[in-house]
Image: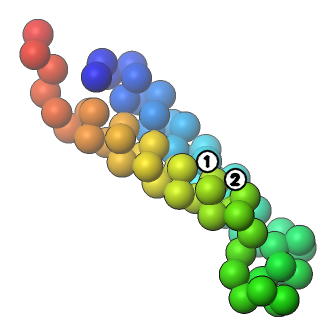
Amino acid sequence: MTRAISVALLVGGVVLLYFGGQSFHSLSNDVARFFTGSPTNKTIWLIAGGIVALLAGLIGLAIPSKR
């Protein structure tokens, strides 16, 4: 994995986590949590995708390139 892809995954992961956090604190999510006890699927997917992208970017940066 090249450094540019790793950095892009890292930035994308941070952006997804930001939007997941914003979605978690929205009014519609508060209503859904009141009735169901869990956040909406959109929120879960944003946070999970952000974590996966962030970890993939960090792992890509931690592994030394073969050049």
Quarter of the image that includes the C terminus: top left
* Residue under pointer 1: 16
Q: Is residue 64 above or below residue 43?
A: above
What is the C-alpha distance between the residues marked 2 and 1? 5 Å
Q: Is residue 66 above or below residue 56?
A: above
* Amino acid type for the residue under numbered disc 1: Leu
State the colouring used for the structure image: rainbow
Q: Is residue 13 left or right of residue 59?
A: right
* Amino acid type for the residue under numbered disc 2: Phe
Circle 2: element type: helix
Q: Is residue 16 left or right of residue 55?
A: right
Which image quadrant is residue 43 in?
bottom right
Q: Is residue 31 left or right of residue 45?
A: right
Q: Residue furthest left?
A: 66
Tell me residue 27's x, y (percent): 89, 73
Which image quadrant is residue 53 in?
top left
Of the pair 36 and 60, the residue shown nearer to us:
36
Tell me residue 29's x, y (percent): 81, 73
Of the pair 54 and 40, the residue shown nearer to us:
40
Quarter of the image that includes the N terminus: top left
Q: Residue at x 71, y 64 (%)?
A: 41
Where residue 19 is drawn, which disc sits there?
2
Circle 1: element type: helix
Q: Residue at x 58, y 59 (%)?
A: 47
Q: Is residue 13 above or below residue 64?
A: below
Q: Are marks 2 and 1 in contact (CB under 8 Å)?
A: yes
Q: Residue at x 26, y 33 (%)?
A: 61
* Mark 1: few/some/many CA within 10 Å (<14, 14-19, 20+): many
Q: How many marks?
A: 2
* Mark 2: few/some/many CA within 10 Å (<14, 14-19, 20+): some
